[in-house]
C-alpha cells in the first residue's frame, strides 16, 4: 500500500491544465487566469484628491494666507485651466488635481470668504494627493496566470480595464456510480437498496472545486455495463467512479475498466477511510476510483479529487492545509493507515477552539461527515494524544466543502 502523499503526487503527475477560454469578468468568479493580466490604464488614471478641500500650491498655503478661489472641480469634472500663484480651486474626494497645484488643503483647515479662502493650517507638497499610477501603472502585470479570481482580484481586473479575462476551461469530470443496490434520491427504494448520496455529493464537490460534473446513469455490478459506461468518459478531463473498488466478488470496476483499456497505476493506499482507492488511465482520460462507502468517497474526494481538479485548472493542487488545533478529547495511537478523523471544532470556555473527534468513525455515516468541521490528520503509527495536546486538522468550512 502506498502513502497518501505518494498517491496524490502520482495522481497529479499525470495532469496538465485545460486550455484557456475567454469569459466576461462578471462570470469569472472562482475561475483561474490562463494568462497574466496587464493593466490597460494606470490607477489612479490622473492625480486626484484624497480629501474634500482645495487644490493649492503648498508654498502659497501658509497660515493666514488668503487664496483667490477661481473655480470648483467636482469628481468627474476636471478644472480646464492651470492654477497660478495665489490661486485655489474647490475640490472633492476623487477630483482631478488641476495643473499647477501640488497639494490639497482640507476644508477643515480653511475658511471660505466670498471669492477667497483663508488658510488656517499649512499643508505640505503632495499632501492628500493620490498620484497617477501610485496603485499600478499602464502596462504593469497586476495578476499572474494561475491565480484564482476572488472578488478582490475581480475588482483589480476591472480597475485595470478588463471586461473579459482568459481563464482555464472548467475540467469536465465524469462521475460513475456503481452498484446493484444504488437508487436515485427520491426513487422508491427496492429491497436491499441504498440511495446514491455519492453521486450528488461528488458532483457538488467537483463544482465547488471549479470543475464541470457530468453524472452518468448508475451502472449495476455487471462487467458489460461497466465496459459500456467507460465509453462515456471519452473526451472528459477525468473519470471518477465510486463503489466496486474493494475485494468482493461483485467489486468489478477495476476488471470492467481494464477490459475497456484501463492502465492501472495503483490500487489500495495506506489511508482510512479510503483504502481501496484506485488510479489509472483509460485511454487519455485519467481515472480515479473512489470507494463506495460515502465517507470514504468524500474524504478521498477532498484529498485527491479536489487537488486533481485544481491541477487541471492550472493551480498547484496542494494537499488541503492542516493546521494544529487543541484536542478536546483523547485520541488513541494509530495503526499503519493514515487516519482522517471526523471531528467538531467547538469554542472552549477560555475562548480558544478545541477539536472533539466523533466516537463513531464508521465510513457509512453521512450525518457525521456532514456535521464535521474538521478532519484530524493521524499519520501512520502516530502515538496516542491526550486532551489538550495539538493535532493537525483540515478545517472543512474555509475550504467550502
Ligand atoms: N474483505 C474486505 N472487505 C472490505 C475491505 C477489505 O479490505 N476487505 N475494504 C473495506 C473498505 S475499507 C471499503 S472503503 C469498502 C469499499 O468498498 P467498495 O469500493 O467496493 O464499495 P461497495 O462495496 O460498492 O460499497 C460500499 C458501501 O457503500 C455503499 N455505496 C456504494 N455506492 C454508493 C453511492 N453511490 N451512494 C451511497 N452509498 C454507496 C454501498 O451500498 C456499500 O454499503 O469495502 C470494505 N470491504
Ligand atoms: O477505507 Mo474504508 O474507506 O475504511 O471505509
Image (cartoon, rainbow, N blue to C red):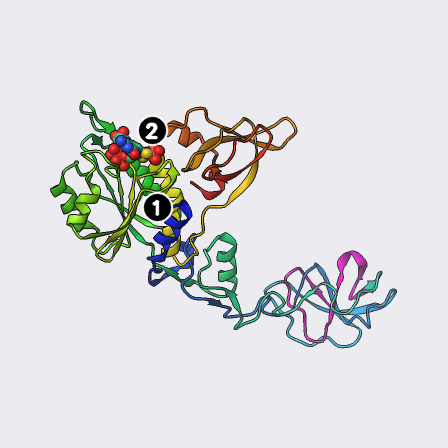
> For the magenta stretch, what is the residue range?
89-117
Say if disc 2 is inside 8 Å of ligand 1.
yes
Secondary structure at badge 2 equals loop
Please name the residue shown 36% across and 60% down the image: 17
Looking at the image, which residue sits at the far left? 224
* 347, above or below 270, in the image: above
Return the residue at label 2.
364
Q: Which mark is residue 316?
A: none
Residue nearer the viewer, 107 or 205: 205
**Cα distance between the residues tagged 1 and 2:** 21 Å
**Quadrant of ligand 1 in image:** top left
- The residue positioned farthest toward the right in the image shown: 64
Q: Nearer the viewer, residue 205 or 66?
A: 205
Screen quadrant of the C terminus: top left
Image coords of residue 315 (percent x, y):
42, 56
- Residue under numbered circle 1: 206
Where is residue 99, by image quadrant? Answer: bottom right
| Residue shown at the point (30%, 36%) measured from the top left | 198
Q: Earlier in the sequence, mark 1 or mark 2?
A: 1
Q: Is residue 231 above or below residue 242?
A: below
In the image, residue 19 lies at what x, y percent? 33, 63
Amino acid at each position: 500500500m502506498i502513502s497518501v502523499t505518494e498517491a496524490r503526487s502520482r495522481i497529479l503527475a499525470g495532469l496538465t491544465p485545460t486550455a484557456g477560454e475567454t469569459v466576461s469578468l462578471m462570470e469569472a468568479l472562482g475561475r483561474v487566469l490562463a494568462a497574466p493580466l496587464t493593466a490597460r490604464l494606470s490607477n489612479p488614471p490622473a492625480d486626484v484628491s484624497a480629501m474634500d478641500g482645495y487644490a493649492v500650491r503648498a508654498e502659497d498655503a501658509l497660515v493666514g494666507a488668503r487664496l483667490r478661489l477661481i473655480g470648483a472641480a467636482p469628481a468627474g469634472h476636471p478644472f480646464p485651466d492651470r492654477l497660478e500663484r495665489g490661486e485655489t480651486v474647490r475640490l472633492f474626494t476623487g477630483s482631478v488635481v488641476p495643473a499647477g497645484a501640488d497639494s490639497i488643503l482640507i476644508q477643515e483647515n480653511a475658511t471660505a470668504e466670498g471669492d477667497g479662502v483663508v488658510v488656517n493650517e499649512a499643508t505640505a507638497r503632495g499632501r492628500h494627493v493620490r498620484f497617477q499610477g501610485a496603485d499600478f501603472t499602464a502596462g504593469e502585470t497586476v495578476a499572474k496566470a494561475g491565480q484564482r479570481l476572488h472578488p478582490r482580484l475581480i475588482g483589480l481586473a476591472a480597475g485595470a480595464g478588463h471586461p473579459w479575462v482568459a481563464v482555464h476551461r472548467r475540467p469536465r469530470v465524469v462521475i460513475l456510480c456503481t452498484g446493484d443496490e444504488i437508487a436515485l434520491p427520491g426513487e422508491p427504494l427496492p429491497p436491499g437498496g441504498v440511495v446514491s448520496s455519492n453521486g450528488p455529493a461528488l458532483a457538488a464537490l467537483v463544482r465547488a472545486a471549479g470543475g464541470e460534473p457530468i453524472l452518468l446513469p448508475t451502472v449495476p455490478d455487471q462487467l458489460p455495463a461497466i465496459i459500456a459506461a467507460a465509453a462515456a468518459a471519452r473526451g472528459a478531463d477525468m473519470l471518477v467512479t465510486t463503489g466496486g473498488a474493494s475485494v468482493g466478488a461483485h467489486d468489478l470496476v477495476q476488471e470492467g475498466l481494464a477490459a475497456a483499456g484501463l492502465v492501472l497505476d495503483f490500487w489500495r493506499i495506506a489511508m482510512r477511510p479510503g483504502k481501496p482507492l484506485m488510479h489509472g488511465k483509460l485511454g487519455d482520460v485519467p481515472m480515479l476510483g473512489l470507494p463506495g462507502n460515502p465517507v470514504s468517497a468524500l474524504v478521498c474526494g477532498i484529498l485527491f479529487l479536489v487537488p486533481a481538479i485544481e491541477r487541471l485548472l492550472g493551480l498547484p493542487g496542494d494537499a488541503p492545509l492542516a493546521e494544529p488545533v487543541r484536542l478536546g478529547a483523547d485520541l488513541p495511537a494509530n495503526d499503519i493507515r493514515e487516519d482522517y478523523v471526523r471531528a467538531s471544532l467547538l469554542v472552549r470556555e477560555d475562548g480558544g477552539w478545541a477539536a472533539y473527534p466523533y466516537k463513531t468513525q464508521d465510513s457509512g455515516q453521512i450525518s457525521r461527515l456532514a456535521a464535521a468541521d474538521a478532519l484530524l490528520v493521524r499519520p501512520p503509527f502516530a502515538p496516542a494524544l491526550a486532551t489538550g495536546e495539538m493535532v493537525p486538522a483540515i478545517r472543512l468550512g474555509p475550504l467550502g466543502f
